[in-house]
Amino acid sequence: MLSMKKLFTTIVCIVASVAAMAQGVVFEPDGTTLEQAAVKAKAENKLIFLDCYTQWCGPCKKMAKETFTLAEVGAVMNPKFVNIKIDMESAYGAPLAKKLQIQAYPTFVIFNADAQEISRFLGYHDAPSFLKVLEEKGKDDASAGLKARFDAGERDPKFLYEYLASLTAAYKGDEANTVAEAILEGKEETFAADSTLRMIFFRNITNPFAKSFVYTAKHPEALTAAIGEMPVKMKIQNVLTGYQRQLINEADGTATLDQANYDRFSALLDEIGMADADHYRLQTLITLAEKQKDFDKYIAYIKQYLANPALDADDMQLARWVRPFSGPNANPQHKEEMKAILRQRLDEIAAGKRQPMNTIGNMRLSRPTDDLLRVLIDAMDGKMPQK
């Protein structure tokens, strides 16, 4: 027979198990890292479930409130997974989001106990849908298997298309780009004639150093003839802008420039002959100065941008640059310099040298941008806008 002490312990364990099953998904405490979860997963012979979320994500909040709180979901997940939630815009989460190529929220990633990704899926799910997908993804190691085959050098076209489709569906942009480069290898001068290869280029090539991108940026004629000038221009701009945004590293509340890749990117802009190459260079430096709160440099770079005859900042860009000086605690000297920049633009509009903007794309503005610039000047002076 069990002693009273052992009987009591057994009852406590049973009660605890029943309580855990009835309380929905049990997540590790806030601040638990993927590395810490892996230690626990190994000790308990479990997988790792990672909920990648942000504070502003509506579907993330809906999952937390409506799905993860349900007993039937907890009954499935708690025995099988070490469950963690990480804010992908936190000091720890931002670099992890970049490493994992998280591009949409919520993203749910399943790892083995060594923190190697098994699979992922995205978006809001009600309980039945979530559990169905979880069952499929929790035992699906196809993604890992495809990666192993690619890393081993397999380049059969059918396999590459299958792997690319898997990566695209999982929003794994960097890896999808690598596979797309392999598909387009040797076809840089001819892919424009093939509709499937054109789609792969537009959908998956994100690396400005990819051979297909460099060739297209230098020689856009064939692709332009196939689909038109505007889509090609937009693709080139989007790839360059996307890479430019990656040149600033943020960690532990600090921002630094990836100088080696900035220099490499700058040289590429010259190589492909971008007329507005200084836009990407200066926009990087302006963003860096803002993140570092070095507003002397911030304004100096803006002035360099405006003085460059090859560049043109529209009224809305000026309005965005004013943002750091909208609060009452902003440096008065910096406010004066920004007001002078806005007044110069208003003088150009008044003299007919420029026209105020009334639309952005297909969206009509509620007031022309010269009115907006006046409101911003008044706001920096502490004046409330007139109705």
Image (cartoon, rainbow, N blue to C red):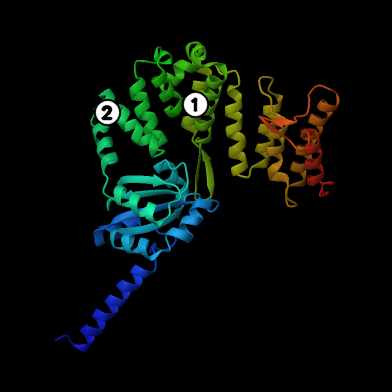
Q: Which one is earlier in the sequence, the residue at label 2 or at label 1? A: 2
Instruction: Give x and y (percent) for residue 283.
Output: 60, 32
**Residue 379 appears in the rendering:** yes
> Disc 2 marks which residue?
159
Classify mark 1: helix, strand or loop: helix
At 43% across and 20% down in the image, what residue appears?
Answer: 198
Q: Is residue 369 left or right of residue 97?
A: right
Label 2 amino acid?
Phe
> Disc 1 marks which residue?
265
| 278 shown above or below 341 | above
Label 1 amino acid?
Phe
Instruction: Give x and y (percent) for residue 226.
Output: 49, 13
Instruction: Give x and y (percent) for residue 230.
Output: 57, 20
State the residue in front, 118 or 91: 118
Q: Is residue 288 left or right of residue 252?
A: right
Instruction: Give x and y (percent) for residue 122.
Output: 42, 46
Disc 1 packing (10 Å; few <14; some 14–19; many ≥20): many
User: In the displayed image of the protein, which residue is found farthest to the left?
Assistant: 1
Classify mark 2: helix, strand or loop: helix
| 2 or 1: mark nearer the eye | 2
Mark 2–mark 1 CB contact (< 8 Å)? no
At 72% across and 45% down in the image, what residue appears?
Answer: 325
State the residue in front, 138 or 282: 138
Q: Check the picture and name the quadrant holding the N terminus.
A: bottom left
- How far separated are the C-alphas under marks 2 and 1? 32 Å
Disc 2 packing (10 Å; few <14; some 14–19; many ≥20): some
